[in-house]
Image (cartoon, grey):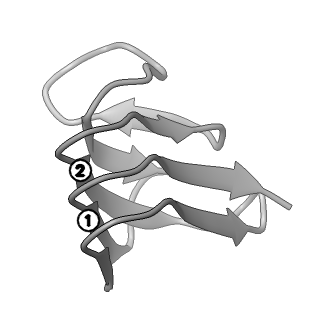
């Protein structure tokens, strides 16, 4: 679980890491450059203020929230 009241969150993960992503920001964008399947959608990736779905098929919950900043999930 990653939280901040103001500021960016950047997470670097191995390209093959599997997780269930729940990420949101009040003022900013969320972007994931790992293989991602949004919950309830066939899109592969989109930058917006919330992103929920599976990274590499899903796994343990990765929760990230910030009130003011961007969230970036990056491949190592």
Mark closer to the chain start, 1 or 2: 2
Residue 6: where, in percent of width, then height? 33, 66
Residue 34 visible: yes
Visible residue check, residue 56: no
Q: Going 39% across and 34% down the picture, which residue do you hit?
A: 29
Judge the density around disc 1: few (<14), some (14-19), many (≥20) Cα neighbours within 10 Å. many
**Percent coordinates x, y for residue 34 in the rendering:** 64, 43
Rendered position, 75 above or below 63: above
Residue depicted at x 72% and y 67%:
12
Camera-side residue: 45 or 40?
A: 45
Residue 39, position as x, y percentages in the image = 19, 36
Q: Quadrant of residue 75?
A: bottom right
Residue at x 60%, y 63% (from the top left corner) = 10
Residue 51 location, quadrant: top left
Q: Which residue is mark 1?
A: 65
Mark linked to residue 18: none
> On the image, numbered disc 2 is attached to which residue?
24
């Amino acid at each position: 679980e990653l939280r901040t009241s103001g500021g960016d969150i950047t997470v670097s993960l191995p390209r093959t890491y599997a997780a269930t992503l729940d990420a949101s920001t009040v003022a900013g964008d969320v972007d994931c450059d790992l293989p991602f399947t949004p919950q309830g959608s066939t899109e592969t990736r989109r930058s917006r203020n919330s992103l929920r779905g599976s990274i590499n098929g899903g796994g343990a919950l990765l929760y990230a929230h910030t009130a003011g900043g961007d969230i970036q999930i990056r491949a190592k």
